[in-house]
Image (cartoon, grey):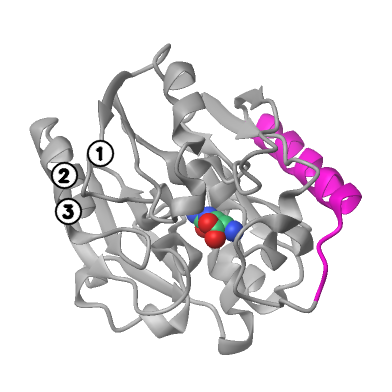
C-alpha cells in the first residue's frame, strides 16, 4: 500500500517545457492548474498523504516529479534526468525524500528518468530510452539488486518513457499500448491491450485500490473494469500536450 505522494505545482511557464507532440496546440495554465488540482484530489481520495512542493519557474517540466527519483520500499534513488534542460529538478526532491528513505544516486555518465522504471511487486522493469542510457540502467539495477529486488532491462521502442506505454494495474496484469505487446520480457504477466485508437490510456495509474485513468477511453475502461478496482477518470489534456500523463506527476511510496 502507498501512504504518500510527492507532487509539485505546475509553474506559470509550464508550456515552455519540452514537447514533441501536438506542437500547434498551446497549453493553458488555468486549465492545467484545474486538472492538477483534480489529480491531487484523486490521490488523496485513494488514501495518500499528498506532499505538495512549490512550483519551480526555472524548470517548466518540474511538476513531472516522477522522473527525478525511483522510490523503493527502503531507498530513494535520485536520478540524473536524461534531458539536459531538466537537470537540476532532482536537487529539490532529494531533501524531501530523505525524510522517508535512504538516499542513493545515479552518477555520471548515467542518465535515468523515473518514467522509464516500472515496479511490479519486487521486480523492476528498466526502460532504455532517449532519456535513460545503459549506464543509468545498470547503476539502478546494481542498487536494486543490492536491496534484494530483481530487474529486467527493456527497450522503449516508441513514446517518451516506458510508462508512457506500459503500466501495472494489479493482479499480475499490465495495461499496454499494443506497440509493446511483443516484448518477451513481459511474457509472465497478463497483458491488457488498449485498442489502437486508445493507446494513450496505457498511461493509467494504480494507487492502492484505485485506478486513475485519463478520461475518454471507453473501450479501455471496459477492459479495466474487470479488475474490480475503483476507477477515477481524470482530464489530462494540458499535461498530454506536454508529453506527460497521470503517472509522471507524482512519486508514490
Ligand atoms: C519531458 O519531455 O520531459 C516532459 N515534457 C514530459 C515528461 C513526462 N514524464 C513522464 O512521462 N514520466
| Element marked by disc 1 | loop
Which corner quadrant of the figure contains ligand 1?
bottom right
Q: Which residue is mark 1?
A: 106
Residue at 65% over, 58% down: 213
Q: Which residue is mark 2?
A: 139
The quadrant of the rendering that contains the C terminus is top left
- The span picked out in magenta is 25-46
Q: Which residue is mark 3?
A: 135
Residue 204 visible, this orientation: no
Q: Earlier along the polypeptide chain: callout 1 or callout 3?
A: 1
Residue at 53% over, 25% down: 4
Crowdedness of circle 2 by 10 Å Cα count: few (<14), some, many (20+)?
A: some
Label 1 beta carbon less than 8 Å to ligand 1 = no
Say if 93 sits above or below 96 in the image: below
Give the overall secondary structure of the magenta segment: helix
Direction from residue 23 to residue 118 in the image, left or right: left
Residue 97 visible, this orientation: yes
Direction from residue 238 to residue 144 in the image, left or right: left
Q: Nearer the viewer, residue 240 or 26?
A: 26
Q: Earlier along the polypeptide chain: callout 1 or callout 2?
A: 1
Q: In this figure, what is the number of numbered marks?
A: 3
Q: Is label 2 in contact with label 3 (beta carbons under 8 Å)? A: yes
Q: Nearer the viewer, residue 27 or 59?
A: 59
Distance of label 1 from label 2 (alpha carbons): 6 Å
User: Residue 56 colored magenta?
Assistant: no
Amino acid at each position: 500500500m502507498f501512504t504518500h505522494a510527492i507532487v509539485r505545482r505546475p509553474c506559470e511557464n509550464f508550456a515552455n517545457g519540452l514537447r514533441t507532440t501536438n506542437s500547434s496546440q498551446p497549453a493553458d495554465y488555468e486549465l492545467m492548474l484545474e486538472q492538477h488540482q483534480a489529480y491531487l484530489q484523486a490521490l488523496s481520495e485513494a488514501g495518500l498523504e499528498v506532499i505538495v512542493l512549490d512550483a519551480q519557474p526555472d524548470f517548466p517540466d518540474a511538476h513531472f516529479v516522477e522522473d527525478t527519483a525511483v522510490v523503493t520500499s527502503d531507498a530513494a534513488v535520485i536520478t540524473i534526468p536524461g534531458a539536459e534542460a531538466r537537470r537540476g529538478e532532482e536537487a529539490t526532491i532529494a531533501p524531501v525524500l530523505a525524510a522517508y528513505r535512504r538516499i542513493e544516486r545515479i552518477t555520471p555518465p548515467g542518465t535515468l528518468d523515473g518514467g522509464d522504471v516500472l515496479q511490479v511487486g519486487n521486480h523492476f522493469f528498466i526502460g532504455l530510452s532517449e532519456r535513460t542510457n545503459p549506464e543509468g540502467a545498470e547503476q539502478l539495477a546494481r542498487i536494486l539488486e543490492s536491496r534484494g529486488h530483481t530487474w529486467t532491462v527493456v527497450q522503449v521502442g516508441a513514446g517518451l518513457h516506458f510508462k508512457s506505454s506500459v503500466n501495472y494495474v494489479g493482479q499480475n496484469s499490465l495495461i499496454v499500448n499494443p506497440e509493446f505487446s511483443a516484448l518477451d520480457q513481459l511474457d509472465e504477466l497478463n497483458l491488457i491491450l488498449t485498442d489502437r485508437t486508445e493507446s494513450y490510456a496505457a498511461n493509467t495509474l494504480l494507487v492502492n485500490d484505485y485506478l486513475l485513468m485519463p478520461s475518454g477511453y471507453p473501450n479501455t475502461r471496459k477492459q479495466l473494469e474487470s479488475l474490480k478496482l475503483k476507477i477515477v477518470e481524470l482530464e489530462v489534456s494540458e499535461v498530454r500536450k506536454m508529453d506527460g500523463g497521470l503517472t509522471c506527476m507524482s512519486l508514490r511510496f
